[in-house]
Image (cartoon, rainbow, N blue to C red):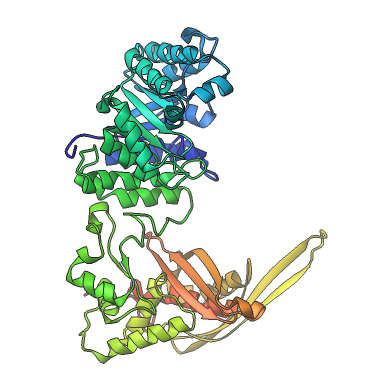
Amino acid sequence: MPGERVYLYDCTLRDGAQTLGVDFSTTDKDGIATDLDGIGVDYVEGGWPGANPTDDAFFGSPPRFHRARLSAFGMTRRAGRSTENDPGLAALLSSGAPVVCMVGKTWDFQVEVALGIELDENVQMIADSIRYVAERADEVIFDAEHFFDGYKSNPDFAVRCLKAALDAGARWLVLCDTNGGTLPHEVETIVAEVTAHVPGDRLGIHCHDDTGNAVANSLAAVRAGVRHVQGTLNGLGERCGNANLVSIIPSLVLKMGFETGVTAGDLTHLTHISRALDERLNRAPDRGAPYVGESAFAHKGGLHVSAVEKDPRCYEHIVPELVGNHRHIVVSDQAGRSNILARFRDIGLDVDAGDPKVNQLVDEVKAREFDGYAYDGAEASFELLARRALGEVPDYFALTSFRVIDERRWNVRGEIVTLSEATVKLEVGGRPYMTVAEGNGPVNALDAGLRKVLIPVYPTLEHLRLVDYKVRILTPQAATAAVTRVMIESADEAGHHWATVGVSTNVIDASYNALHDSIVYKLFRDGVTSGGVPAAAD
């Protein structure tokens, strides 16, 4: 019931590590575990002791927890072995983790086919293992593997496995939808039936996302009585992933009224923790992620923006700041005056709603987006566009011309190499400059040429770096003559990130347009005047 306590168990460091393309280092595991402890997750599963050197190193020197309990994962004893002589159980107990989570089979099909043993022997393996570890560890959790498939096949046997673990001393009995094929209505029905045999405050849920229902299944299980939820940050996991705790936590707290170890203050760090994980994985955060995505509270249509301005409840299901996110007013060809004015406020511009420049800017945005520009992902370019319309952006430099040459040839070692060389002519402060630079590709050479001229005049550009570069073909029917859109993401030494856009039938020209905006934005935000001197502080 609402107000009751639900316990959160994170298995990112093990289940999440099984994601295709994810390979956590020990440092990564330490950082993620510390973040989870800081936000108030009850259990952090460190991995499987003895399975690989990374997990062993993590358990050898785990981070100091202040709120969470460290859990080690393993399996019940093997068939034909005693608990005292099972190496898996020995590794679990030697890990030093106060909590041990053991997985055991509860589907008769897998017991008979995969393990090749009798059902009674499987039940005995569960009971022996739980009892042995419970006598030596602070807390034992039993993960009932393939429970929902097992319950559908043979409910009596599946429940026998649970009761064996309960009677042997398991604190939690976790019902696992290992194949991820169970639907929410099935989960709720089966969990309700299981609570007739095992109290809900001893039951947990562990769902995979193969039907896209892992979060819904987890919440359905809580509705039916379970009080322990397992999942991963951002839904990491093998195949389609695990239940996403980043979605589950605010749904439990803000929507369903349950209490967790995550306080209201902790919840405001949820967006940061989600994106920090993506940073560790060197991948772009999911813009459309519920609650924490950049687009989760983005408004594009002018009618929507106007309504949100009056009452956010019209198009926002929660206050974004509750989860550390914020409202994002998108500027696009669907924009109206409300979008433009709201975006002005975001960038600190106080403009009279009746100013004719607002209508002019709306028209210009729509015209430019018709030509291929996209300002919903290039806020820095929009800000420059708006401030230029108001006459606020200095003329830092003017491009006279540039030329880029690519040469593909054989070197003296008989290898094919490609060299890029850019010749750049600029005018800065009324003085003409010309320079030549080489680079790893034409855009890099062009960037290097610009920097050779500009950094001596504007030293702040020394810390400008490009962190992402994307090209999109807008008119594929034109083949190699297509219009291209280039999006560049930049960053500086302070950790600020911004995105700029350029469009042209020539990809190098489009790249220059985006690169030019990136450089100008950096100079403007640093308060640099056109002479290379920072503007006086207010």
Q: Depth check: 520 or 55 in front? A: 55
Q: Depth check: 292 or 176 in front? A: 176
Image height check: is 45 above or below 100?
Answer: below
Regarding residue 43, the answer to whether it shows in the image is no
Regarding residue 189, the answer to whether it shows in the image is yes
The quarter in which the N terminus is drawn is top left
Give the percent coordinates (x, y) of residue 64.
33, 31
**Quarter assignment of residue 144:** top left
The tally of labels here is 0
The residue positioned 83% from the left and 60% from the top of the image is 414
**Quarter assignment of residue 236:** top left
Q: Is residue 399 left or right of residue 459?
A: right
Give the percent coordinates (x, y) of residue 308.
22, 69
Q: Is residue 216 left or right of residue 306?
A: right
Image height check: is 126 above or below 13?
Answer: above
Give the percent coordinates (x, y) of residue 152.
43, 30
Q: Depth check: 480 or 244 in front? A: 244
Image height check: is 460 above or below 321?
Answer: below
Q: Residue furthest bottom?
A: 356
The residue positioned 35% from the left and 75% from the top of the image is 331
Q: Depth check: 31 or 481 in front? A: 481
Give the percent coordinates (x, y) of residue 153.
46, 28
The residue positioned 31% from the left and 40% from the top of the image is 220
The quarter in which the C terminus is drawn is bottom left
